Image: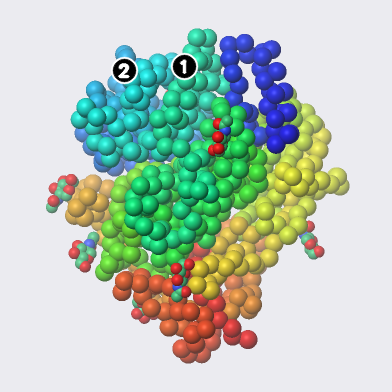
Amino acid sequence: MKLLETVASVASIVACVTGASRPKQLVPFVYESIPLGQITPNGWLLAEMQTEADGLAGHLYDFYQYVKDAKWLGGTQEYSGLNEAFPYWLNGLVPLAYTLDDERLKGQVHDAMDYLFEHMVQPDGWIGFEEGGYRLIWARTLIFFAWTNLVDANSTYEKPVVDAMYSFNTLMNSMLKNKGTGVVPQKDGVLDDGYYFWFLSRVAEMIVSLQWLYEKHPRDGEMSKLWENMEMLHKFGYKWEDWFAESSYAFGDLYDLPERVTDDNFQFLHGVNVGEGLKAPAVIRRYTHNDSLIQTTRDGVQWSMKYHGAPSGTIYADEREDGINPYYGAETCTAVEVMFSNSYNFQALGESFYGDGSELAAFNALPGAMTGDWWAHVYMSQANQPYSKNLSTTPFYNTNSVGQTYGLEPNYPCCTVNHPQGLPKFVQAAFVKKGSNGLVHALLSPATVITDVAGGKTSVECRTNYPFDDELQYNIQTDKAFDFYVRVPTWALNSSLTSQSGSSSTLDSSTGLRKISVAAGNSSLTFSVGTQVRTEPRANDTVAVYRGQLLYALEIGVDVTSAPPKNYYNLTTYPASYAPPQAVDYTMLNTTEWNVAIDPSTIVYHPASDPRASLPTPIFAPGKPPMYMTVKACLIDWPLFMGSVPGWPIAKEQRKCLGDTFDAKLVPYGSAKLRMSELPTIDLV
Ligand SMILES: *[C@@H]1O[C@H](CO)[C@@H](O)[C@H](O)[C@H]1NC(C)=O
Ligand SMILES: *[C@@H]1O[C@H](CO)[C@@H](O)[C@H](O)[C@H]1NC(C)=O
Ligand SMILES: *[C@@H]1O[C@H](CO)[C@@H](O)[C@H](O)[C@H]1NC(C)=O
Ligand SMILES: *[C@@H]1O[C@H](CO)[C@@H](O)[C@H](O)[C@H]1NC(C)=O
Ligand SMILES: *[C@@H]1O[C@H](CO)[C@@H](O)[C@H](O)[C@H]1NC(C)=O
Ligand SMILES: *[C@@H]1O[C@H](CO)[C@@H](O)[C@H](O)[C@H]1NC(C)=O
Ligand SMILES: *[C@@H]1O[C@H](CO)[C@@H](O)[C@H](O)[C@H]1NC(C)=O
Ligand SMILES: *[C@@H]1O[C@H](CO)[C@@H](O)[C@H](O)[C@H]1NC(C)=O
């Protein structure tokens, strides 16, 4: 904490000299983000993102009613009064288009931007089409995420976006001063309280963009209004720091708590709210300078994972958080928000485990929610999901019976429009800057950054099959000498970072970073991370099996059928002309038994025959990853929950093999669309 205070006060002295128009300082990020467009994926990650662009994400603008015919674009379609579908889409498409530098997708973004500036930026400062009492701020939050990113990537948009954000800020200031209008349900108006509730839990999302404006585009006479709006949004909104506290947090399974407790706190229990709220204390700390919020953020993330987390790195919440049973559902939107909040927290607070949280969800939860071709997604993923079909009974708190099928909009359409942001924002956060002459590989993955470091141009290309392999190769070209760092995952047994010329690195255990000095000119480095198969205990004597950042699961044989997509609203089939032929709804039935127990002491890892060879495309599809594990296993008695999905396996003392033992195969979770990943243990040797 001492160190952080020193850093903060040095920053304010510097700012007093150079930035006279800013009256107060925000706490600086520990690591500074790099503008959108300067980091690009390569290798398997590029192939995955191109698949995303060729899939649903890259075609919503052409056909999907809640985007193509959104009221934001002059149409008539919105799935709710939140008017958030188009804003979610824009928030994902800006980084997808610019990270891939894809002309087709950039064209979609630019067309939409032109329409917004011609029709949605209103003379009184409002952005959108809503009038009178229906002016809820929430969807503007997503527009601002998209806009701030676009300005960082393309300066053509700087003036119109910054002007519009300042006008909106002035209007918002008068709204908030009028009893929190735009955030708080109003008594006399015609507003639906249900819609208002969402922004109350999500005010920190808007504060992120206000802070961007404050630091990157300060304007005389506007700064105090920005600061005041941060304070008012926080004042009127729900306070995550009060929820992530020993005295209030829901430790344990929510079905065991009185309904009153869970109903009264629903705003803190809704999955996507939690995914977003994980960064709220870190956002608030930037202007309150309250360092207690460092621990609050840590608690919020660690408790969410421990008491409500799935082994794939996301949070179980089938609308509402539940606990840790493997038949609970995790919403696809939640996975992308967890990824984004963790990468934000890593930049804001600098602790390495946040980086692991982002990688874990990116390499497991997100691909596990998508079909390999990225044309279909589940609304709810289950850790143990041996079939994906119209269930006879829904085991979920509030999700329909087809919520765990892969399709266009198997339940609420929010995940159809919100899933695209996941990977591009992950790539955007892959590298960050440290001080004036440091560059950090923060989220390990095959990616290239070209940026300014230490006053010169630097290019760092990381070639790797990570997380499918343990070695990362860097080719570096730089005008100026600089310090290069690699974030060492917290599960690493050991690690090394060496240069071809023989210089070696040091590990700073307080930051979890390995550091090496890079001279001007060309160099190449190798980072290796030591890992082995590890298991983590889960409920009811089950385990989750990992190697490095990959979760492994028992893959279930699949019988796949598909049908034209259905409307989520009343589950009737859309007209044949509505969607491209690749957009279908799937039913996947098990062709193998799923009631399998394993003896973890017998796990054997089988690496790819050439761990450095190019991986198949797409990698997260059945049968694609060349590495796997085998383990001694047998079938056990395992009752269904509600007659519908695998429940808790029977108690360990009662587990008996129903037949011979056999070698079961475990594969990377994201590639197995039907799988069991919380596996009961049994002694077989
Ligand atoms: C920036 O935006 C303008 C306006 O849409 C566009 O013409 C230009 O190609 C964009 N630049 C890049 C590098 O994408
Ligand atoms: C700082 O945050 C903590 C945790 O939420 C809170 O208990 C404390 O009152 C805050 N301090 C100030 C000065 O606001
Ligand atoms: C799911 O099955 C029920 C009958 O069990 C049926 O009423 C319903 O229409 C089915 N839903 C879909 C989307 O097929
Ligand atoms: C980690 O330690 C093992 C055992 O000593 C050694 O074989 C391996 O090379 C080390 N790996 C790294 C990346 O340092
Ligand atoms: C550095 O590498 C680049 C790309 O491989 C090459 O074009 C350039 O000539 C090299 N420069 C030096 C000084 O070796
Ligand atoms: C299984 O685990 C859950 C969650 O911890 C617990 O509530 C339940 O009692 C356990 N069931 C059995 C049969 O042990
Ligand atoms: C189902 O909902 C859609 C969209 O609201 C509507 O167009 C269609 O007529 C509805 N179909 C039935 C059978 O109610
Ligand atoms: C698929 O799962 C069902 C339901 O649990 C089970 O009865 C059936 O035996 C499994 N099918 C096969 C082919 O193993």
Left or right, 209 with respect to 348, comes to left
Looking at mark 1, is its residue's CB closer than 8 Å to ligand 2? no
Q: Is residue 37 left or right of residue 594?
A: right
| Residue 225 numbered mark, or none | 1
Q: Which residue is mark 2?
A: 122
Quadrant position of residue 475? top right
Q: Earlier in the sequence, mark 1 or mark 2?
A: 2
The spot of residue 607 in percent (x, y) is 64, 67
Q: Quadrant of residue 257?
A: bottom left
Residue at the right extreme of this rendering:
502
Q: Looking at numbered disc 2 in the image, what kind of residue is underneath it?
A: Gln
Secondary structure category for the residue under label 2: loop
Q: What is the crowding at mark 2: few (fewer than 14 residues within 10 Å), some, or many (at least 20)?
A: some
Report helix, strand or loop for mark 1.
helix
Q: Residue at x 58, y 60 (%)?
A: 550
Towards the viewer: 218 or 87: 218
Q: Would you say the residues marked 1 and 2 are in contact, meaning their CB atoms lie under 8 Å apart?
A: no
Residue occupying the point 40% across, 30% down:
236
Expressed as whole percent of the image width and height from the top left, the position of residue 126 reads 33, 20
Res 372 seen here: no
- In the rendered image, which quarter contains the N terminus? top right
Q: Viewer-proximal residue, 364 or 478?
A: 364
